[in-house]
Amino acid sequence: MHWRYCELLAGAVANLATVSYGCGIAWLSPVILKLTDVELRDNPFDVVLSERDQMWIEAAFALGGLAGPVLACWIAQHKGPRLALLLSSVLYIVAWLLFMIVGSVSLLIVARTVLGLANGYVLLAVTLYIGEIASDRYRGALGCFIQIGTTLGILLVYCSGPFVSYLALQAICCGVPILFGTVFLYMPETPHFLVQRGHNQRAVETLMFLRGARQAAEVAAELTEIGEYVKRRESDDGVPTRTIHHLKHLLTGRGNRMALSISLGLVMFQQCSGIDTITANSELLFVEADASLGPVYGTIVLGVLQFLSSCVTPWFIDRTGRRPILLASSIGMAITLGVLGTYFLLKRHAVPLAPIRWLPLASLVGFVTLFNAGFGPVAWAIVMEIFAHELKPIGVMLCVIGSVLFDYGILRLIGALITAAGFDWAFWTLACICVAACAFCWKIVIETRDLNLIEIQQRLRGIKVVRL
């Protein structure tokens, strides 16, 4: 492998952790059908899961997700982003082993809590790690790798879940963090953390490896820049004081406040598009829609296209820019969700739908393709690059916590809408949210293409960046 690709290699290996994240999101789709099957053909609890149990499973996943980023942030700041990310494999292994040995619904809820903890944890850990190894050249592409790993995990569950037993699915999912932990052992610590701990020589060697440099002089300027970032991060003594100090700067500084507003807004609209709700309930959705391809194979097609579309974005994100992708993605998602809502309206009024039974699959394919080629990867790419380095840990932590809260909130809202008004109103509501996302990206989100981190901070503060 050519030296200049080592940075991409490290990013790709780090994002193997997000394959487990995707498995955690999609796990419910095949498993819920097994656990609600009245014939108990593949149910380790010998009892049909009630609606109340399902509600607790969803709540437990969200509760664990709130604690995960706080734990990851603390470990990353004290032990380094590399070790923090490596420990995510331990959390996932524990979670999948718990799923294998649980003998009651209450223990299943505990296992689901641990899985939520691991998901919230890994999302923060991988974002910090990638953010601290990425150069300006590959910053956008590496930010999109998170979505590629996530969709690969979703596809793995979609392709295996319906065809293997409950226990076999947990074993397959457990193999993913084992593989990640083994491979990631060979990846370096981030240069920022090495400089912070005074290991300047190791930081130079790491930068030379990541940037494909043959001499230390080639990375000297970047090393000096990292030293300045570390000084800002370590300006106070004592962890509690430092955290409060950074939180104050995040909320009071004009540019920092703008970065937080943009990041939280993107994360909110990303989750409130309903992507995780659709992903976790895709088989049930195809059953309700009476789709022509059927729930199992329709879901697999959905998973394949999610993965393929997410692989496209890294190739053009730095050519077209972030905002055009976000705008096109949000408009397209609004249209596909509106069409899906119309289909369910016709179904509710008993309109003959035999000629258009292909429409639910086509609409869902369009939605997930547009999301995974646009809003999904680009939102996290911007979150990864928009915060000042010294504020990145706490800023990203707030975004991950917000992501979990928004995800759970839209899940409950859509569930209530489906019960009260039907699938048509639920999808129309999601379509309206996507229209609002387009307006937000047009009015608030700044373009960061071709800008270095200093220029991004200047633009956030309202300073016009002029390039000579």
Image: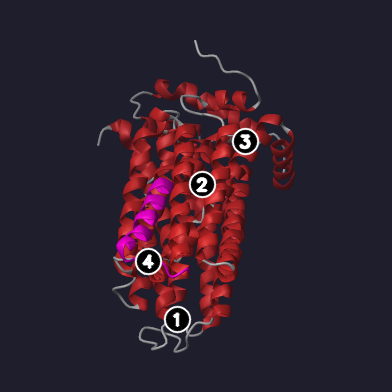
Q: Eyeballing the image, is 232 above or below 243?
A: above
Q: Is residue 16 above or below residue 200?
A: below
Real-space Cα separation, disc 4 to disc 2, in angstroms: 24 Å
For badge 1, the amino acid type reads Thr
Q: Residue furthest top?
A: 468
Q: Position of residue 120 (x, y in %)?
A: 54, 57
Sequence-earlier tag: 4 or 1: 1
Please indicate whether residue 184 sits to the left or right of residue 130 in the image.
Answer: left
Q: Disc number at residue 36?
A: 1
Task: Determine which residue is flagged by label 3.
Answer: 259
Frontmost of labels 4 and 3 is 3
Query: Does residue 197 show up?
Result: no
Q: Main secondary structure of the magenta part?
A: helix
Magenta region includes residue 84: no
Local secondary structure at mark 4: helix
Magenta extent: 349-372
* Mark 2 neighbour density, 10 Å: few (under 14) some (14–19) many (20 or more): many
Q: Position of residue 192 (x, y in %)?
A: 53, 36
